[in-house]
Image: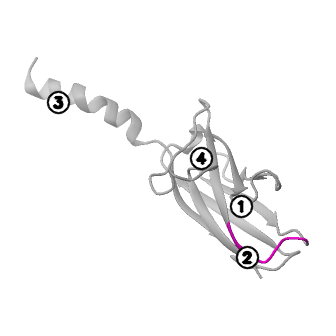
Amino acid sequence: MKPALILIVMAFPLLIFAGGPKVKSISASSTELSPGQTATITVQLKGKARDVKSMEFIVREFPYDVPPYVLKSVDEKKNRKWEAQIPVPYEAPVGTFHLELKVKMADGSELVSEETSGNSYGKAGTLVVSVL
């Protein structure tokens, strides 16, 4: 095989996986909330976002007591913008909480971000919120 052809064959797998989805940003209308308030949380993706099947936030401190907050795609054509309205329960304790983002792909795998790969429940990102 010629050197140029070998290089192309070796680089082909990188081209296939290079466009996979990644979390571009996670933002909230407010990260300091009182019980009874609602925050709008937006997740922006980049790359091949059509492969994303579902997205949810799990409260790290209460993974079994608080049901996951499910996000919905608001950009159905490209699937790059997802949002959720997250209410703070009236009985929520005061403190700082970590919302871990779990992103499921169409093939059943989970999207993992390098920065948050050590998370317990959602490995695509984390949003820190405070209940005052």
| Chain-order first, disc 3 or disc 2 | 3
Distance, label 4 to label 3, CA atoms, is 32 Å
Between disc 4 and disc 1, the foreground one is: 1
**Residue at position x 55%, y 44% in the image:** 49
Residue 38 falls inside the magenta stretch: no
The reply, left or right, for residue 64 in relation to residue 18 is: right
Identify the image's colour scheme: rainbow, by chain, secondary structure or one colour.
one colour
Residue 92 falls inside the magenta stretch: yes
- Residue 85 lies in quadrant: bottom right
- Residue 51 lies in quadrant: top right
Between disc 4 and disc 2, the foreground one is: 2
- Residue 7 lies in quadrant: top left
Q: Which residue is mark 4?
A: 78
The segment highlighted magenta reads: 91-97
Label 1 SS: loop
Distance, label 1 to label 2, CA atoms, is 10 Å
Label 2 SS: strand
Label drawn at residue 61: 1
Q: Position of residue 82 (x, y in %)?
A: 67, 55
Q: Are marks 4 and 2 in contact (CB under 8 Å)?
A: no
Q: Which residue is mark 2?
A: 95
Q: Position of residue 108 (x, y in %)?
A: 62, 31
Distance, label 4 to label 1, CA atoms, is 33 Å
Q: Are marks 1 and 2 in contact (CB under 8 Å)?
A: yes
The reply, left or right, for residue 113 in relation to residue 92 is: left
| Chain-order first, disc 4 or disc 2 | 4
Q: Which residue is mark 3?
A: 7
Q: Position of residue 35 (x, y in %)?
A: 86, 76
Amino acid type, callout 2: Gly
Distance, label 3 to label 1, CA atoms, is 48 Å
The quadrant of the picture occupied by the C terminus is: bottom right
Between disc 3 and disc 2, the foreground one is: 2
